[in-house]
Image (tube, rainbow, N blue to C red):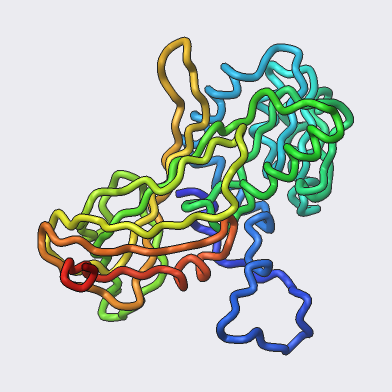
Amino acid sequence: MSAAALAPVIAIPSKRRIGEIAPPDRVDDDAYLGQFIPLHYHGQLLTDEPRLRAFQETIDRLVPEGSHVVELGAGTGVLSFFASKRARKVSCIERIPHVAAAARALIAINGASHKVRVFEGDARTFVPDEPADVVICDMLHAGLVRDKQIAVLEDFKARHEAHFGRAIPTIIPEATILAVQPIFQPFDFNGFFAPIPLFSPPGIGSGQTVELGSPEVYAIVEYARETPLDFVFDRLMTIDTAGTVNALRFVTKNVVGIFPETGRTCDWHMNYLSIPLAEPIHVSAGERIRVKFHYEAGCSMQSLGDGLSAQIWRRSQHG
């Protein structure tokens, strides 16, 4: 399971005074920034073998010999280490001081300090001392919530082009595909009812989870192009299996690398994210439901959940 899936919401002090309570109808998304992830969560990413394998293969194939690589969000520095095998120079930036210090130490232990330099600072304002041939950014989370993948990359691309007069040739990962699926998700835990966001490994059923309809793609994010800052979904979804829709499952597939010469891609499927609905609905096979949501990239999971709705669609009610 990825660190993003395991990490609890980390409260970061906002501009409110201590003891002041935010209005109940407002979610302070700035207090849920995914960039604030301590070292022990980054350590969990090292045990995510599908992730590491996908990034390592892609870096081996797409990083040119003698190039300059920039990594936004160093974590433990493992991706910069992979890049150092081929690059002339790697510049990586990490916001949290103790994580940046650990990355420097780990890069040194692995004998790559002569190529990799770890900067401490905010990736959203970082400008390297020379143009980047490749940018690596793994600020990824299921549904592209919490972590600031899109905002950080969009800001960096704009600064890079303004400063150096050219676009970035290669960005890793290359794309993210987002889909949503109606499901029945058990929320009973030894008699304790808790409808809260849940994660489960991709491709594996979680307990008695029932897939009531097929996943539908709602966004394909290509990082080399201009990327969306928010996602809007308002569609009719067909129910394949009778049951109760009490949650929506968010499916996230990262296309880490595209290899045209072999006609294949290197993919990393993130953990499924199941968000409970406020009102479960009973459905029959063949019925359609209207599913709606609208959320900003990088927002909190609470914001995502607050904007979900699903209801039976009846032709007589809609003309």
Quadrant of the frame with the C terminus: bottom left
Q: Give me the residue at 37% from left, 61% from top.
A: 274
Res. 270 visible in picture: no
Residues 155 and 49: in front is: 155
Residues 292 and 85: in front is: 292
Taking 152 as reference, is 282 above or below it?
Answer: below
Tell me the quarter of the picture where residue 96 sits. Answer: bottom right
Q: Give me the residue at 51% from left, 70% from top.
A: 302
| Residue 301 spot, x, y in % from top left | 51, 65
Taking 277 as reference, is 130 above or below it?
Answer: above
| Residue 119 spot, x, y in % from top left | 83, 41
**For residue 316, side relative to residue 220 (left or right):** left
Taking 289 as reference, is 20 above or below it?
Answer: below
| Residue 183 spot, x, y in % from top left | 25, 60
Tell me the quarter of the picture where residue 305 sits. Answer: bottom left
Tell me the quarter of the picture where residue 77 sits. Answer: top right
Q: Give me the residue at 60% from left, 54% from top.
A: 147
**For residue 180, side relative to residue 151 (left or right):** left
**For residue 220, side relative to residue 16 (left or right):** left
Residues 186 and 227: in front is: 227
Taking 204 as reference, is 110 above or below it?
Answer: above
